Amino acid sequence: MIIDRDKERDIAALIRKDKGSATKEIYSAYAGYVAGICARYLSSDDDIKDVAQDSFVKIFISVGSFRYSGAGSLTGWIGRLTVNCALNYLRDNNRLRFATSPFEIPDIADDPPDVEGLSADDLASLIRELPDGYRTVFNLYAIEGKKHKEIAKLLGIKENSSASQYLRAKALLAMKIKEYLNSK
């Protein structure tokens, strides 16, 4: 979801004037964005709603500390708060389990899945089917653009563990994509 730059600037101006009047505008403009981030990290609709609500509470409490620094800064700030809320939720509910047993990670480089016939919604749905630990590392690396060193620090795991979880997530996702496309 892309937030209009003018809308973002207007909301930032409202925040500077009076954070109370900005809350309705923030919610209206960013509800879909926040829910989308939550859906990347959580598989249950109830969990998504809970974390989205928690994210908005944190946004509204912290909005006075936000400083607008140009186009995208409000969106980025809201996104980071939301990702942190999702990670905290997963951590607090012991949902960040990572595979530790050695198994052969299939090499998908030789036969990557053809995603031509796959919609963005279908791909998002398949990502949501990944185990929580895989999905979390996959999102942080592939979507958020974080390095394995950053992911390891965020999740309290070793850098090598982050890299192996990402490879396993990528391989499992490739298998799910192939199965999905073959079933159509």
Image: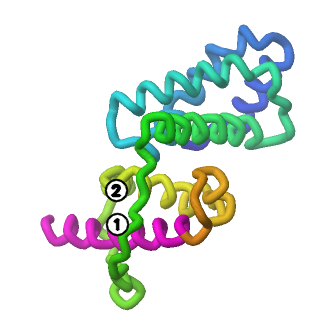
Looking at the image, residue 110 sits to the left or right of residue 151; the answer is left
Residue 115 visible in the shown view: no
Looking at the rendering, the stretch of residues picked out in magenta corresponds to: 161-184
Question: What amino acid is found at the position of numbered circle 1 in the picture?
Answer: Leu
Q: Pointer 1: what residue?
A: 173
How many marks can you see? 2
Question: What amino acid is found at the position of numbered circle 2 in the picture?
Answer: Leu
Around disc 2, counting alpha carbons within 10 Å, would you say few (fewer than 14), some (14 to 19), or many (20 or more)? many
Q: Nearer the viewer, residue 118 or 160?
A: 160
Q: Quadrant of residue 167?
A: bottom left
Residue 106 placed where, x, y %? 34, 82
Q: Residue at x 48, y 53 (%)?
A: 136
Q: Is residue 79 magenta?
A: no
Around disc 1, counting alpha carbons within 10 Å, would you say few (fewer than 14), some (14 to 19), or many (20 or more)? many
Q: Residue furthest bottom?
A: 110
Q: Pointer 2: what residue?
A: 130
- Vertical position of residue 117 compared to residue 150: above or below: below
Q: Main secondary structure of the magenta part?
A: helix
For the residues bearing labels 1 and 2, Cβ distance under 8 angstroms? yes
**How much space separates mark 1 and mark 2, taking CA atoms?**
7 Å
Quarter placement of the C terminus: bottom left
Q: Residue furthest front?
A: 101
- Vertical position of residue 177 compared to residue 47: above or below: below
Q: Residue at x 31, y 63 (%)?
A: 118
Secondary structure found at label 1 = helix
Quarter placement of the N terminus: top right
Q: Residue at x 74, y 43 (%)?
A: 72
